[in-house]
Image (tube, rainbow, N blue to C red):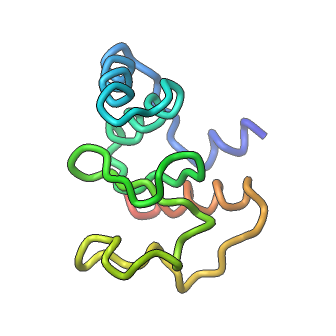
C-alpha cells in the first residue's frame, strides 16, 4: 500500500521548520498537535485545500489553506468558498470509501500542481 502512495505522490519530510510551524498553528487555531502538523505540511507544500473530517469545515489556515470536510462538500453555504473558486469539484462523483477519497484528493492535488 505504501508503494502505491509513493508512486502517485510526492512525499515531503517533516522538517524542524514544519514542526515549529505546526506548533504555532496548534496554538493559534486550537488544533491538536497531530492536525497542526498535517496543516503545517500542507501549507509548506503550497496546498490550497486540506481535506479533513476532523477539522472545522471551511476554516482558513494562514493566507491560503482552506479545510474542507469531504462529507460536507457541496452542502456548504454559497459564500463559504472564495470568490472565483470552484465549489470543490462538486461536479465529480466522490467515491464512498475513505481511502478512495484520499487517493482522489491527492491525485487531484498532484495534477493541479503540474
* Quadrant of the snapshot with the N terminus: top right
* Quadrant of the snapshot with the C terminus: bottom left
Q: Is residue 98 above or below residue 15?
A: below
- Position in image of residue 90 (x %, y %): 52, 81
- Residue at point 58%, 81% (across, down): 92
- Position in image of residue 47 (x %, y %): 36, 50
Q: In this view, does 30 lie to the left or right of 93?
A: left
- Position in image of residue 61 (x %, y %): 31, 45
Q: In this view, does 42 lie to the left or right of 2?
A: left
Specify the farthest residue to the bottom.
Answer: 91
- Residue at point 31%, 77% (across, down): 79
Q: Is residue 32 above or below residue 102?
A: above
Which image quadrant for residue 84?
Answer: bottom left
Q: In this view, does 3 lie to the left or right of 45?
A: right
Q: In this view, does 51 lie to the left or right of 1?
A: left
Q: In this view, does 84 lie above or below 36?
A: below
Judging depth in this view, the residue of 82 and 109 nearest the camera is: 82
Q: Is residue 51 above or below residue 40?
A: below
| Image label count | 0
Specify the farthest residue to the top.
Answer: 16
Judging depth in this view, the residue of 3 and 95 nearest the camera is: 95
- Residue at point 72%, 38% (across, down): 3
Which image quadrant for residue 27?
Answer: top left
Amino acid at each position: 500500500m505504501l508503494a502505491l502512495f509513493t508512486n502517485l505522490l510526492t512525499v515531503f519530510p517533516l522538517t524542524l521548520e514544519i514542526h515549529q510551524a505546526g506548533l504555532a498553528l496548534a496554538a493559534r487555531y486550537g488544533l491538536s498537535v497531530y492536525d497542526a502538523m498535517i496543516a503545517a505540511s500542507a501549507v509548506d507544500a503550497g496546498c490550497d485545500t486540506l481535506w479533513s473530517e476532523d477539522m472545522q469545515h471551511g476554516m482558513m489556515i494562514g493566507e491560503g489553506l482552506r479545510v474542507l470536510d469531504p462529507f460536507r462538500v457541496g452542502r456548504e453555504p454559497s459564500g463559504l468558498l472564495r470568490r472565483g473558486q470552484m465549489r470543490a469539484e462538486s461536479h465529480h462523483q466522490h467515491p464512498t470509501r475513505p481511502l478512495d477519497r484520499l487517493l482522489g484528493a491527492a491525485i487531484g492535488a498532484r495534477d493541479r500542481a503540474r
